[in-house]
Image (cartoon, helix red, strand yellow):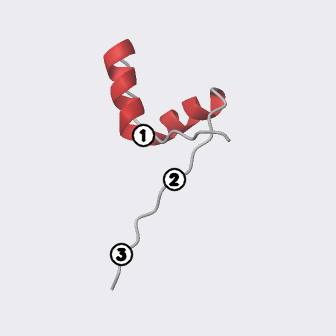
Amino acid sequence: MRTQIYLRLSDLQKFLKKQYDVVFDRLQSYYNLLKEAGITWKKTHSYKSS
């Protein structure tokens, strides 16, 4: 069975800032980085109940 690890995009942002002093202006840049690394992800949706 494969173990799945879930991280928030904010975790990636903090890691890149701390380790490499890199901050992207657009969120799409982080998604592009994940894609280039061969890492898949799901965007989460928040649903508001009425």
The disc at residue 48 is: 3
| Numbered disc total | 3
Q: Earlier in the sequence, mark 2 or mark 1?
A: 1
The alpha-carbon separation of the residues under discs 3 and 2 comes to 16 Å
In the displayed image of the protein, which residue is found farthest to the top? 20
Question: As shown in the figure, which amino acid type bears the numbered disc 1?
Answer: Leu
Disc 2, disc 1: CB below 8 Å?
Answer: no
Q: Earlier in the sequence, mark 3 or mark 1?
A: 1
Question: As shown in the figure, which amino acid type bears the numbered disc 3?
Answer: Lys
Q: Residues within 10 Å of mark 3 (few under 14, many from 20)?
A: few
Q: Position of residue 20 (x, y in %)?
A: 39, 13
Tag 2 residue: 43
SS for callout 1: helix
Quadrant of the rendered image containing residue 18: top left
Tag 1 residue: 9
Q: Position of residue 32 (x, y in %)?
A: 58, 34
Task: Give the vertical position of 2 relative to 48 (above or below).
Answer: above
Quadrant of the rendering where the N terminus is positioned: top right
Disc 3, disc 1: CB below 8 Å?
Answer: no
Quadrant of the rendering where the C terminus is positioned: bottom left
Task: Give the vertical position of 41 relative to 16 (above or below).
Answer: below
Residue plotted at (56% across, 50% down): 42
Disc 3, disc 2: CB below 8 Å?
Answer: no
Residue plotted at (41% across, 42% down): 8
Question: As shown in the figure, which amino acid type bears the numbered disc 2?
Answer: Lys
The alpha-carbon separation of the residues under discs 2 and 1 comes to 9 Å
Q: Earlier in the sequence, mark 3 or mark 2?
A: 2
Quadrant of the rendered image containing residue 3: top right
Task: Give the vertical position of 37 relative to 32 (above or below).
Answer: above
The alpha-carbon separation of the residues under discs 3 and 1 comes to 21 Å
* Position of residue 30 in the picture relative to residue 22 (left or right): right
